[in-house]
Image (cartoon, helix red, strand yellow):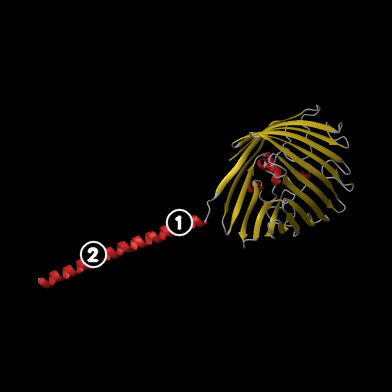
Amino acid sequence: MLQHLGSNKTILGMKIILTKVSKIWVIAISLCINYTVNAQSTEDESIELSGSVDTYFRTNLSGGDKLDAPASSFANLNGFALGMVNVKAEQSTSQGGFVADLVFGPRGTDAVFASPYYSATGNIVNQLYAYWNANEKLTLTLGNFNTFLGYEVISPVDNFHYSTSYLFSYGPFSHTGLKADYVLSDDHSIMVAIMNPTDLTEMNDVNLYTYGLQYGFKDTYFNFLYGKQAVDADATFQADITGSYELSDKFSLGVNASYNETMNAGGFYGVALYPALAIKDGFDAGLRVEYFKELEAGGVAYGADNSVIDATVTASYTTKDLRLIAELRLDQSSTAQFNSMTSDQLSSFILTAVYSF
């Protein structure tokens, strides 16, 4: 009997010890899990969602055909019209990150063109890429990304004017490929890229490739693009310079000059200036003055050897996430291109609301 009681005490003692050991293990595992989660949350940044919505009213002031519009991209619809919805998801860590940028609406469709193979889904992909920070100086990017040429961009959030220039409209909008960005120093950078032909976003069914190069010095970028864009075409060459300069606390100046030529097919060259003035408390005013000349071998907008001057005056008011834009634009062509080819001049007015989130 005493021996049996001793056995029970021994078993009871072992149970107590096991219970305590189990609790210790539970506490230790919990601490490890908590430490791991905290370490990961400290290292990894959360996925950021952002985007914009834009809509506008446009009318011609010079009379004639109300549906007439400049041969530049976007903001060309008459009356009350829709721009686009832009939704972007992105994540950036010390190792790398990704960007998924989707667009819906007329401006978005014009930006990504008609995807030839996956029109049901491809027509909404503005950007889709992942990148790897190989070290502090080198970043490799694979996927579809907006072009490195030109001063203006697709999203109206990042443009001062709502309508776009001819230089932007007839350069590339986006590229699909592989690029390497390398920081040479605080003031110098370089980028090299191999890409599908311009605007072939989903795949490369022509087995042709385009090459890109960018050299950056402070706020000025020298951009180059070369490659065949179609099987039955000669190679396209484009040289482009962009610059953005903060001349004072209130005054800034943007510059874009570009030359684009496809041998035996034509092209264009031109220059655009973008002075802008911050007036006070969200009020800004700016000007775009652009000269655009099409080559004698062939034109891309109005025709061979034609030239056009775009003068755009914009005033805007920004309150928190909403920007209201009023724009007056005058297009002066060297030949009659407007009002059913009877006038060389077109003036228009645009009122726009752009909301960012």
Q: Residues within 10 Å of mark 1 (few under 14, many from 20)?
A: few
Residue at x 83%, y 38% (from the top left corner)? 309
Q: Position of 208 compared to 56: left or right?
A: right
- Marker count (numbered): 2
The CA distance from mark 2 to mark 1 is: 33 Å
Residue 324 seen from this side: no
At x 65%, y 56%, the residue is: 143
Q: Residue at x 64, y 48 (%)?
A: 125
Q: Which mark is residue 257?
A: none
Of 279 and 45, the residue lying toward us: 279
For the question of whether residue 239 can be seen, the reply is yes
Q: Is residue 310 left or right of residue 316?
A: right
Answer with mark 2 or mark 1, whichever residue precedes in sequence.
Answer: 2
Which residue type does callout 2 highlight?
Ile
Could you say where residue 203 lies in the image, as x and y percent from the top left?
69, 56
State the residue in front, 89 or 92.
Answer: 92
Amino acid type of the residue tagged 1 in the rendering: Asn
Along the line of sight, the residue nearer the viewer: 137 or 201: 137
The residue most toward the bottom is: 3
Q: Position of residue 310 (x, y in %)?
A: 80, 37
Is 64 situated left or right of 112 in this image?
right
Q: Quadrant of residue 54?
A: top right
Say above or below: 47 vs 320: below
Kindly identify which residue carries mark 1: 38
Q: Quadrant of the C terminus?
A: top right
Element type at mark 1: helix
Q: Which mark is residue 16?
A: 2
Q: Residue furthest front?
A: 248
